[in-house]
Image: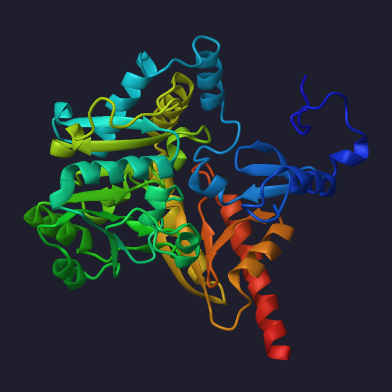
Amino acid sequence: MTDLSEPGSPAPAPAADRAGAAWLDRYTDAVMNTFGTPGRVLVRGQGAHLWDADGKEYTDLLAGIAVNCLGHAHPAIVEAVSTQISTLGHVSNFFTTPAQVRLAEELISLTFPGRPEHDSRVFLANSGTEANEAAFKIARRHGGAGRPRVLALQDAFHGRTMGALALTHKAAYREPFEPLPGGVEFIPAGDTEALRNALGPDVAALIVEPVQGEAGVRELPAGYLEAARELTRTAGALLIVDEVQTGMGRSGAWMAHHLLAPGVVPDVVTLAKGLGGGIPIGAVVATGEAASLLGPGQHGTTFGGNPVACAAALAVIDTIRGQDLLGRVERLGSAWARELLAVDGVDEVRGRGLLIGVGLAAGLPPAGEIAATLAEHGFIVNAPRPDTIRLAPPFILSDDDASAFTTTLSEVLARALSEKAGS
């Protein structure tokens, strides 16, 4: 049996080389420094738990940043991928496969429930940034020379390819790669009047995240998506909703905008992350005129829509549906948020379902330091902002694991507050 804790090598490595520190040394010598030094060397996962190269166990409350929605080594995904790759692993998009067609049909019905299915179409990609890149091209096709402007929100994150990066607000991400594709303007998130003033006949599209994850898990205020839909429709602009992080059940509904604005039908919705349960896949789901704007030769991908990734996504959808994991996400998320809010040192709890931002009180150490301390205690989280811990665990997380984290967070914050008081 292959030792999954060992990268492939010509000969078995000495026991000492299995330690995390040794792997990190090799990482530094071999991998580009785009992510900084990894916090851990992880070698195995099962359900909501992970183990590192030194044998330490962790509860995974990040799930690959909202990706592993069914946890690690879920039998439905393992079976679907194993069966598909033993049958047909890859074909070019000169052809199609039953898995690709079935997934496209499922995504249309999940994204635009109640709409005639023949009005909508899907483009399958490999990631969220690729999905947003395709959505940007749809906006350009819609706008043409007469509509050169695209609106995005302040604090938005839509990806790191050049087009998706142009839609991303954070200067530190953008500035090293300027000039970026032009015409993108940023307006305050949730400000209807600012949107009204920015829109005009020269705007091709508005792109929004229902919950801004990188901004600290902040959902758009009540009524904003409804206003955005009405104002963009009046202006003749597309409404693009980025559900890369929030979609596929993460909020407790198939799409977060279904919860925040049930009557709103966007022109374009982008998906990824949880869609494949850990297998790389992204999707653009468009309806109405937007569904037919990209024609033959105007966009493409070698691996997008490959049968293995599609089989994984179908297994994710079937499992979420069959085990009522949407209900599980809503129930656990609501109860957990109440428990977290009662922790001394927690100022605010934001988000929906199992996308939770834990806002830390002023005077505590930066959230990155708190996250590192939590990892030492066996809990993997991350800090999108200096005052926010982000939780995006698998949907199968147990009540006991959630409660154990709350207890540990309470202890860690109490210690930090005590040290502050004594200094």
Indicate whether 323 appears above or below 364. above
Q: How is the image coloured?
A: rainbow
* Farthest-out residue, top: 87
Which quarter of the figure is the C terminus placed in?
bottom right
Residue appearing at x 52%, y 49% in the figure: 65
365 vs 236, nearest the viewer: 236
401 vs 418, nearest the viewer: 418
Indicate whether 175 appears above or below 2. below
Indicate whether 363 appears above or below 390. below
* Farthest-out residue, left: 234
Position in image of residue 348 (x %, y %)? 45, 72
Position in image of residue 306 (x %, y %)? 44, 22
Q: What is the quadrant of residue 123 in the picture?
A: top left
Position in image of residue 398 (x %, y %)? 56, 46
Residue appearing at x 74%, y 42% in the figure: 30
266 vs 195, nearest the viewer: 195
Q: What is the quadrant of residue 271 in the picture?
A: top left
Residue appearing at x 78%, y 32% in the figure: 6
Q: What is the quadrant of residue 255 in the picture?
A: top left
Which quarter of the figure is the N terminus placed in?
top right
From the viewer's perspective, is 214 left or right of 2? left
From the viewer's perspective, is 299 left or right of 120? right
> How many circles with numbers are drawn on the protein?
0
